[in-house]
Amino acid sequence: MSSIYITTLIIALIAILVCYAFIAQSLEKKRKQKQRLLAALKARSRNFKYMISGLPTDFLPKELNILVHRCLVEVCEQLSQLDSSDNSHLQDLQLYSGQLEELKRKNKPNKHIKIENPQQIKDVKRALEELNRFIIQFEARGNIDKGQLKIYSAQIKKLVLQITVDAYLINAKQSHKAEKLRLAAHYYTLAHKLLSRENPDGSFNKQIQQLAGVIKQLQDQLHKDEPEYQESEEQTALKAEASSEWNSFEEKDDNWKKKNVYD
Protein backbone atom coordinates (compact mmCIF):
# COMPACT_ATOMS: atom_id res chain seq x y z
CA MET A 1 0.00 0.00 0.00
CA SER A 2 1.56 3.28 -1.12
CA SER A 3 2.12 6.22 1.19
CA ILE A 4 -0.10 8.40 -1.05
CA TYR A 5 -2.98 5.95 -0.67
CA ILE A 6 -2.53 5.79 3.13
CA THR A 7 -2.36 9.59 3.37
CA THR A 8 -5.51 9.96 1.27
CA LEU A 9 -7.28 7.38 3.42
CA ILE A 10 -6.29 9.16 6.63
CA ILE A 11 -7.47 12.52 5.25
CA ALA A 12 -10.76 10.95 4.20
CA LEU A 13 -11.23 9.39 7.64
CA ILE A 14 -10.48 12.72 9.32
CA ALA A 15 -12.95 14.45 7.03
CA ILE A 16 -15.60 11.85 7.86
CA LEU A 17 -14.93 12.25 11.59
CA VAL A 18 -15.12 16.05 11.33
CA CYS A 19 -18.38 15.82 9.41
CA TYR A 20 -19.77 13.34 11.93
CA ALA A 21 -18.76 15.59 14.83
CA PHE A 22 -20.33 18.60 13.13
CA ILE A 23 -23.57 16.72 12.43
CA ALA A 24 -23.67 15.33 15.98
CA GLN A 25 -23.07 18.80 17.40
CA SER A 26 -25.82 20.27 15.23
CA LEU A 27 -28.26 17.54 16.20
CA GLU A 28 -27.43 18.01 19.89
CA LYS A 29 -27.91 21.77 19.58
CA LYS A 30 -31.31 21.27 17.90
CA ARG A 31 -32.27 18.72 20.56
CA LYS A 32 -31.45 21.17 23.36
CA GLN A 33 -33.29 24.00 21.58
CA LYS A 34 -36.33 21.75 21.23
CA GLN A 35 -36.15 20.78 24.90
CA ARG A 36 -35.93 24.44 25.96
CA LEU A 37 -38.87 25.35 23.72
CA LEU A 38 -40.90 22.42 25.05
CA ALA A 39 -40.15 23.42 28.64
CA ALA A 40 -41.15 27.04 27.94
CA LEU A 41 -44.38 25.99 26.21
CA LYS A 42 -45.29 23.57 28.99
CA ALA A 43 -44.70 26.28 31.61
CA ARG A 44 -46.87 28.68 29.60
CA SER A 45 -49.53 25.99 29.25
CA ARG A 46 -49.57 25.49 33.04
CA ASN A 47 -49.99 29.24 33.57
CA PHE A 48 -52.88 29.49 31.12
CA LYS A 49 -54.53 26.37 32.56
CA TYR A 50 -54.23 27.92 36.01
CA MET A 51 -55.94 31.09 34.77
CA ILE A 52 -58.78 28.99 33.36
CA SER A 53 -59.30 26.49 36.19
CA GLY A 54 -57.37 27.91 39.17
CA LEU A 55 -58.75 31.45 39.28
CA PRO A 56 -62.05 32.24 40.99
CA THR A 57 -65.08 31.89 38.72
CA ASP A 58 -65.64 35.02 36.60
CA PHE A 59 -62.39 36.60 37.84
CA LEU A 60 -61.28 37.33 34.27
CA PRO A 61 -63.45 39.58 32.05
CA LYS A 62 -64.98 37.76 29.08
CA GLU A 63 -62.55 39.38 26.61
CA LEU A 64 -59.51 38.25 28.60
CA ASN A 65 -60.99 34.81 29.20
CA ILE A 66 -61.41 34.37 25.44
CA LEU A 67 -57.86 35.59 24.88
CA VAL A 68 -56.46 33.14 27.46
CA HIS A 69 -58.30 30.29 25.72
CA ARG A 70 -56.98 31.46 22.35
CA CYS A 71 -53.43 31.57 23.74
CA LEU A 72 -53.80 28.12 25.31
CA VAL A 73 -55.16 26.69 22.04
CA GLU A 74 -52.12 28.10 20.23
CA VAL A 75 -49.74 26.65 22.83
CA CYS A 76 -51.46 23.24 22.61
CA GLU A 77 -51.09 23.31 18.82
CA GLN A 78 -47.37 24.00 19.14
CA LEU A 79 -46.93 21.28 21.76
CA SER A 80 -48.82 18.72 19.67
CA GLN A 81 -46.50 19.47 16.74
CA LEU A 82 -43.26 19.44 18.75
CA ASP A 83 -44.17 16.49 20.96
CA SER A 84 -46.51 14.38 18.84
CA SER A 85 -45.79 11.26 20.90
CA ASP A 86 -47.74 12.76 23.83
CA ASN A 87 -51.46 12.45 23.06
CA SER A 88 -52.41 14.70 25.97
CA HIS A 89 -51.49 17.79 23.95
CA LEU A 90 -54.00 16.89 21.25
CA GLN A 91 -56.62 16.13 23.88
CA ASP A 92 -55.99 19.53 25.50
CA LEU A 93 -56.26 21.19 22.09
CA GLN A 94 -59.68 19.65 21.50
CA LEU A 95 -60.85 20.45 25.05
CA TYR A 96 -59.87 24.12 25.09
CA SER A 97 -60.96 24.70 21.49
CA GLY A 98 -64.43 23.52 22.53
CA GLN A 99 -64.39 25.71 25.65
CA LEU A 100 -63.35 28.70 23.53
CA GLU A 101 -66.33 28.28 21.21
CA GLU A 102 -68.68 27.86 24.19
CA LEU A 103 -67.24 30.93 25.92
CA LYS A 104 -67.82 33.09 22.85
CA ARG A 105 -71.54 32.32 23.06
CA LYS A 106 -71.87 33.25 26.76
CA ASN A 107 -72.60 36.76 28.00
CA LYS A 108 -71.93 37.52 31.68
CA PRO A 109 -71.39 40.98 33.24
CA ASN A 110 -67.92 41.67 34.65
CA LYS A 111 -67.61 41.97 38.43
CA HIS A 112 -64.85 42.37 41.00
CA ILE A 113 -63.97 39.03 42.61
CA LYS A 114 -61.98 39.57 45.81
CA ILE A 115 -59.14 37.13 46.57
CA GLU A 116 -58.33 36.80 50.27
CA ASN A 117 -55.61 34.14 50.24
CA PRO A 118 -52.10 35.71 50.17
CA GLN A 119 -50.51 32.78 48.31
CA GLN A 120 -53.30 32.75 45.73
CA ILE A 121 -52.79 36.49 45.22
CA LYS A 122 -49.11 35.85 44.44
CA ASP A 123 -50.00 33.02 42.04
CA VAL A 124 -52.65 35.13 40.31
CA LYS A 125 -50.32 38.11 39.95
CA ARG A 126 -47.60 35.91 38.46
CA ALA A 127 -50.11 34.43 36.02
CA LEU A 128 -51.37 37.88 35.00
CA GLU A 129 -47.81 39.10 34.44
CA GLU A 130 -47.21 36.11 32.17
CA LEU A 131 -50.43 36.87 30.29
CA ASN A 132 -49.43 40.52 29.91
CA ARG A 133 -46.04 39.55 28.51
CA PHE A 134 -47.66 37.06 26.14
CA ILE A 135 -50.17 39.53 24.67
CA ILE A 136 -47.32 41.97 24.02
CA GLN A 137 -45.59 39.20 22.06
CA PHE A 138 -48.94 38.40 20.42
CA GLU A 139 -49.19 41.98 19.15
CA ALA A 140 -45.56 41.98 18.00
CA ARG A 141 -46.28 38.89 15.86
CA GLY A 142 -49.37 40.53 14.36
CA ASN A 143 -51.91 38.22 16.06
CA ILE A 144 -53.70 41.23 17.56
CA ASP A 145 -53.56 44.93 16.70
CA LYS A 146 -52.40 47.82 18.90
CA GLY A 147 -55.98 48.73 19.80
CA GLN A 148 -56.66 45.24 21.13
CA LEU A 149 -53.33 45.24 22.97
CA LYS A 150 -54.31 48.49 24.69
CA ILE A 151 -57.69 47.08 25.77
CA TYR A 152 -56.24 43.80 27.06
CA SER A 153 -53.35 45.54 28.85
CA ALA A 154 -55.77 47.92 30.56
CA GLN A 155 -57.91 45.01 31.76
CA ILE A 156 -54.88 43.13 33.09
CA LYS A 157 -53.58 46.27 34.79
CA LYS A 158 -56.95 46.76 36.48
CA LEU A 159 -56.94 43.16 37.73
CA VAL A 160 -53.39 43.52 39.07
CA LEU A 161 -54.46 46.78 40.72
CA GLN A 162 -57.39 45.04 42.39
CA ILE A 163 -55.39 42.12 43.77
CA THR A 164 -52.56 44.44 44.86
CA VAL A 165 -55.11 46.46 46.84
CA ASP A 166 -56.59 43.21 48.19
CA ALA A 167 -53.09 42.18 49.35
CA TYR A 168 -52.54 45.54 51.07
CA LEU A 169 -55.89 45.22 52.85
CA ILE A 170 -55.13 41.66 53.99
CA ASN A 171 -51.81 42.84 55.45
CA ALA A 172 -53.49 45.88 56.99
CA LYS A 173 -56.14 43.75 58.73
CA GLN A 174 -53.54 41.24 59.95
CA SER A 175 -51.35 44.07 61.30
CA HIS A 176 -54.38 45.68 62.95
CA LYS A 177 -55.34 42.37 64.56
CA ALA A 178 -51.76 42.00 65.86
CA GLU A 179 -52.03 45.55 67.30
CA LYS A 180 -49.37 46.86 64.92
CA LEU A 181 -51.41 49.96 64.25
CA ARG A 182 -48.69 51.96 62.53
CA LEU A 183 -48.00 49.20 60.03
CA ALA A 184 -51.73 48.73 59.50
CA ALA A 185 -52.08 52.45 58.79
CA HIS A 186 -49.23 52.19 56.29
CA TYR A 187 -50.89 49.35 54.35
CA TYR A 188 -54.22 51.18 54.33
CA THR A 189 -52.40 54.27 53.07
CA LEU A 190 -50.75 52.27 50.27
CA ALA A 191 -54.16 51.00 49.16
CA HIS A 192 -55.59 54.54 49.37
CA LYS A 193 -52.75 56.08 47.35
CA LEU A 194 -52.86 53.39 44.68
CA LEU A 195 -56.61 53.65 44.19
CA SER A 196 -56.43 57.46 44.15
CA ARG A 197 -53.69 57.42 41.52
CA GLU A 198 -55.52 54.95 39.25
CA ASN A 199 -58.97 56.51 39.51
CA PRO A 200 -59.49 58.73 36.43
CA ASP A 201 -63.15 57.76 36.06
CA GLY A 202 -64.00 57.98 39.77
CA SER A 203 -64.97 54.30 40.00
CA PHE A 204 -63.00 53.86 43.25
CA ASN A 205 -64.37 56.97 44.99
CA LYS A 206 -66.43 55.04 47.56
CA GLN A 207 -63.56 52.73 48.52
CA ILE A 208 -61.12 55.65 48.67
CA GLN A 209 -63.45 57.51 51.02
CA GLN A 210 -63.84 54.47 53.28
CA LEU A 211 -60.07 53.99 53.44
CA ALA A 212 -59.53 57.65 54.26
CA GLY A 213 -61.85 57.28 57.25
CA VAL A 214 -60.03 54.17 58.53
CA ILE A 215 -56.61 55.84 58.10
CA LYS A 216 -57.72 58.95 59.99
CA GLN A 217 -59.00 56.88 62.90
CA LEU A 218 -55.69 54.98 63.12
CA GLN A 219 -53.59 58.12 62.82
CA ASP A 220 -55.61 59.87 65.53
CA GLN A 221 -55.15 56.85 67.81
CA LEU A 222 -51.41 56.69 67.08
CA HIS A 223 -50.94 60.40 67.68
CA LYS A 224 -52.72 60.03 70.99
CA ASP A 225 -50.77 56.93 72.10
CA GLU A 226 -47.31 57.83 70.73
CA PRO A 227 -47.00 61.61 70.21
CA GLU A 228 -43.17 61.50 70.17
CA TYR A 229 -42.80 58.43 67.94
CA GLN A 230 -39.82 58.18 65.55
CA GLU A 231 -39.59 55.48 62.90
CA SER A 232 -36.67 53.00 62.97
CA GLU A 233 -34.57 52.09 59.91
CA GLU A 234 -36.02 48.56 59.96
CA GLN A 235 -39.58 49.89 59.85
CA THR A 236 -38.67 52.27 57.03
CA ALA A 237 -37.21 49.37 55.02
CA LEU A 238 -40.31 47.24 55.66
CA LYS A 239 -42.58 50.01 54.40
CA ALA A 240 -40.43 50.52 51.30
CA GLU A 241 -40.67 46.82 50.48
CA ALA A 242 -44.45 46.89 50.93
CA SER A 243 -44.69 49.90 48.60
CA SER A 244 -42.76 48.26 45.76
CA GLU A 245 -45.30 45.68 44.52
CA TRP A 246 -47.32 47.88 42.15
CA ASN A 247 -44.23 49.74 40.89
CA SER A 248 -42.65 46.37 40.11
CA PHE A 249 -45.56 45.40 37.85
CA GLU A 250 -45.49 48.76 36.02
CA GLU A 251 -41.71 48.49 35.48
CA LYS A 252 -42.07 44.95 34.07
CA ASP A 253 -44.86 46.14 31.79
CA ASP A 254 -42.71 48.98 30.42
CA ASN A 255 -39.66 46.73 29.99
CA TRP A 256 -41.62 44.08 28.06
CA LYS A 257 -43.06 46.72 25.73
CA LYS A 258 -39.65 48.31 25.15
CA LYS A 259 -38.07 44.90 24.51
CA ASN A 260 -40.60 44.08 21.81
CA VAL A 261 -40.18 47.50 20.20
CA TYR A 262 -36.42 47.03 19.91
CA ASP A 263 -36.71 43.37 18.90
Image (cartoon, rainbow, N blue to C red):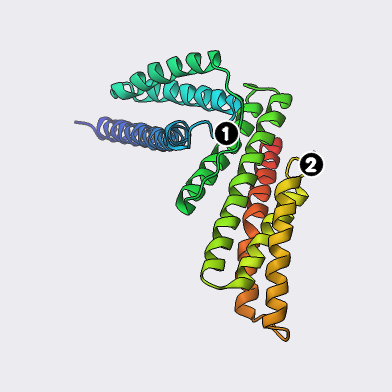
User: On the image, numbered disc 2 is attached to which residue?
Assistant: 202
Given residues 90 and 109, the one toward you in this image is 109
Amino acid bearing label 2: Gly
Residue 12, compared with residue 167, is above or below; it is: above
Q: Residue at x 43, y 20 (%)?
A: 96
**On-image quarter of the N terminus:** top left
Amino acid bearing label 1: Phe
Given residues 20 and 250, the one toward you in this image is 250
**x and y percentages locating residue 122 in the rendered image:** 50, 50
User: On the image, numbered disc 1 is attached to which residue?
Assistant: 134
Between marks 2 and 1 in the image, the one whose residue lies nearer the viewer: 2
Task: Examine the rendering and report whether any part of residue 166 can be seen.
Answer: yes
Question: Residue 261, located in which quarter of the rendered image?
Answer: top right
**x and y percentages locating residue 49 in the rendered image:** 43, 32
**On-image quarter of the C terminus:** top right
Given residues 25 and 1, the one toward you in this image is 25
Where disc 1 sits, the SS reads helix
Left/right placement of residue 260 relative to residue 2 reads right
Q: Residue furthest left?
A: 1
Left/right placement of residue 148 relative to residue 6 reads right
